[in-house]
Amino acid sequence: MPTADAATWFGQAPPDLSLTARSRGTDWIYSFLKSFYVDPGKPTGVNNLVLQGASMPHVLWRQQGMQRAVFAEHFDEAGNSHEVFEGFELETPGALSAAEYDQMIRDMTAFLAYVAEPVQLERRGLGIKVILFLVVLLLFSILLKKEIWKEVH
């Protein structure tokens, strides 16, 4: 989606979740995709608990359904009130059950992590080979040191 069009449609460009997988991690993306709730005051009709005011619409609403966030008013020691999130209530059921939706989000998050850095598996494999090489080199270095210094008492 072109950034200029996204800014026109949503007020600002939605986040690129493949880049977010590298910067914030997959747990953040999983929580982000699960925490959309109905908010009639927003241009997209939904808001997100993880990223308040996100310009990204809830594109998976047909699978998850629409949920409402339940907030309760709590008071601190000074008597100031603030809202505390208590949970979600499903307003409109989606095409998937809660377990199926969770699995879909886990799969999608894993895919986004892969797309963010497709050479990661290759790099990790190379890292293991380098560490094994360094261990073998260390062993040879220790044996060489013992050989050189064996006659010095």
Image: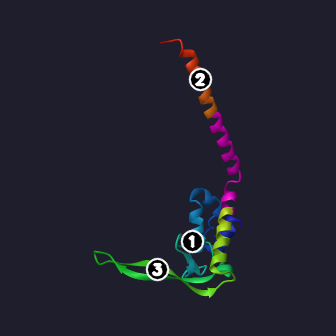
Instruction: Name the residue carrying label 1.
Output: 54
Sequence-wise, which precedes: disc 1 or disc 3? 1
Residue at x 67% of width, y 40% of height = 129
- Can you give x and y, in whole percent of width and height, for residue 122 in the image? 71, 47
Residue at x 60% of width, y 29% of height = 139
Sequence-wise, which precedes: disc 3 or disc 2? 3
Mark 1–mark 3 CB contact (< 8 Å)? no
- Can you give x and y, in whole percent of width and height, for residue 32 in the image? 57, 70
Q: Which amino acid is tagged 3?
A: Glu
Q: Quadrant of the N terminus?
A: bottom right
- Can you give x and y, in whole percent of width and height, for residue 23 in the image? 58, 57
Q: Which residues make up the magenta segment? A: 111-134
Between 126 and 141, the residue placed more toward the observer is 141
Sequence-wise, which precedes: disc 1 or disc 2? 1
Name the mark nearer the viewer: 1 or 3: 3
Q: Which amino acid is tagged 1?
A: Ala
| Cα distance between the residues tagged 1 and 3 | 20 Å
**In which quadrant of the rendered view does residue 107 lie?**
bottom right
7 in relation to 20, above or below? below
135 in relation to 76, above or below? above
Which colour assignment does the render follow?
A: rainbow
Q: Is residue 108 left or right of residue 82?
A: right
Residue at x 66% of width, y 47% of height = 124
- Can you give x and y, in whole percent of width and height, for residue 77 in the image? 28, 75
Residues packed near mark 2 inside 10 Å, few (<14), some (14 to 19) or many (20 plus): few
| Cα distance between the residues tagged 1 and 2 | 60 Å
Question: Residue 143, which numbered label?
Answer: 2
Instruction: Name the residue carrying label 3.
Output: 86
